[in-house]
Image (cartoon, grey):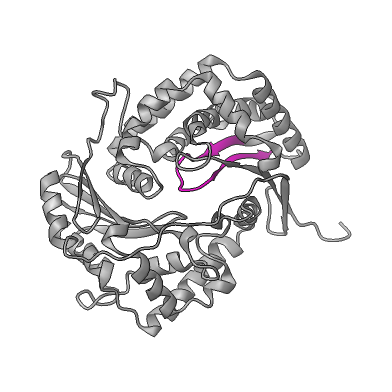
Amino acid sequence: MSRLFIAIGMLSLTIAGFQSSASAALFHPKTHTLANGMLVVVIEDHRAPVVTHMVWYKVGSADEPPGKSGIAHFLEHLMFKGTPKVPSGQFSKTVARNGGRDNAFTSYDYTGYFQNVAQDKLDLVMGMEADRMTNLVLTPDDVVTERDVILEERRSRTDNNPGAQMREAMSAAQYLAHPYGIPVIGWKHEIEKLSRDDALAFYRLYYAPNNAVLVVAGDVEAEAVFALAEKHYGPLARVSTPPRRRPQEPPQRASRQVVFKDGRVSQADWRRSYLAPTRSAGASEHAIPLSLFADMLGGGTTSRLYRELVVKRKLATSAGAYYSATGLDLGRFMLHATPSPGVSLGEVEAAMDETVAAVLMDGLPAADLERSRTGLLAAAVYARDSMFTSPRIFGDALTSGLSVEQVEAWPDEVRAVTMEQVMTAGRAVLKTENSVTGLLLPKVKEGK
């Protein structure tokens, strides 16, 4: 599974497999742009009479105005409150009554909504989604109720979770200027002040066809989907959406350390993140080689970190690396390790530093590169069996600065990566001054 997640991060997976680029495509996407600017992507898959309908907005938590953290996620919740045509709370109930399921998600760079339904219900859900793109109705009670829901979500997932709190603190320490350092769910004191006017202002500014990507996958014909899109989304007016201008990171010149101690911690944990380029930002030529480097260094039980720290030296029960190549702005390369019983975080960190330094100095075996290359391409091929994966591939890529053409080019780029490029990428990113180290420890009572 780790290779699948790395492959997703490389470009939110891929649409190609093992053959030459002329015959490699798995999903064969077909595209059409409506007159109002909405891009429509269709991936035909006729193995089962079901359809996934997704709308991805090019706005996420990193696009929020200062002091309004959490508004993107807050609006995602409020989008289920209703319109004049679909009363409050009836959207999901209508989908369920018609045998489908729906949900939504918010990230730094996008907000997405999806429905999985039978083939003959696509017209229904597309009409409902187009309706709430422009006709959302919010009452004061809706806002108060949903704000309380989100505050409880933050309490349960972050405030009551020491590991989540440490990771949140590491992100804030990593980004000196960029809003990626602000949690997607928002800061508690700012969530508490979010209002109906805040939500509607954000909605009217960003929720428009020209700021959205429609992705449909499943048992459909592309031309029929394009016709439905013209019917439901075509009449919607464009909105003058502001450009995505975000504060950018200055050069990072000093390593940082976050130490989080909590009495609820039963298992210590060690993590380190490095500021890293993506396919859309920074030294993007390193992005794909860096993905292979992450897999070789810490992508599974055959990786260098696992073999050294877990198998050989028995200092950790787990150890690995993770990197995502998608993102509109600079991302992060992550290292992690969980110490074995009786082993201190200091011992784990020393072993991690030693192992990484040796890799950067001496390189990795050529066989490791071929194994990672094959594994990542295989994970991408296997992913085609998921009706949810293919639209996620394109939605994530297209809202994070990539094009359909770049998605399709990914497999050939992976095949062309050399060991020299892999090591150059690793050495460019894994620099001490770019790092934040996180230590999660139990809080020991005084006198003990």
Q: Which residues are magenta?
A: 319-340
Q: Can you give x and y, in whole percent of width and height, for residue 127 in the image?
A: 18, 64
Left or right: 39 with respect to 446? left
Q: In this rendering, does residue 340 appear at all?
A: no
The picture quadrant where one finds residue 235 is bottom left
User: How many numbered discs?
Assistant: 0
Q: Can you give x and y, in whole percent of width and height, for residue 389 in the image?
A: 33, 43
* Residue furthest top as drawn: 366
Q: Is residue 162 magenta?
A: no
Q: Can you give x and y, in whole percent of width and height, for residue 170 in the image?
A: 64, 52
Q: In this rendering, does residue 360 appear at all?
A: yes
The one of 284 and 119 positioned closer to us in this rendering: 284
Left or right: 187 with respect to 255? left
Placement of the C terminus among the 4 image quadrants: bottom right
Q: Residue at x 72, y 59 (%)?
A: 263
* Residue furthest bottom as drawn: 140
The one of 177 and 447 positioned closer to us in this rendering: 177
Left or right: 230 with respect to 37? left
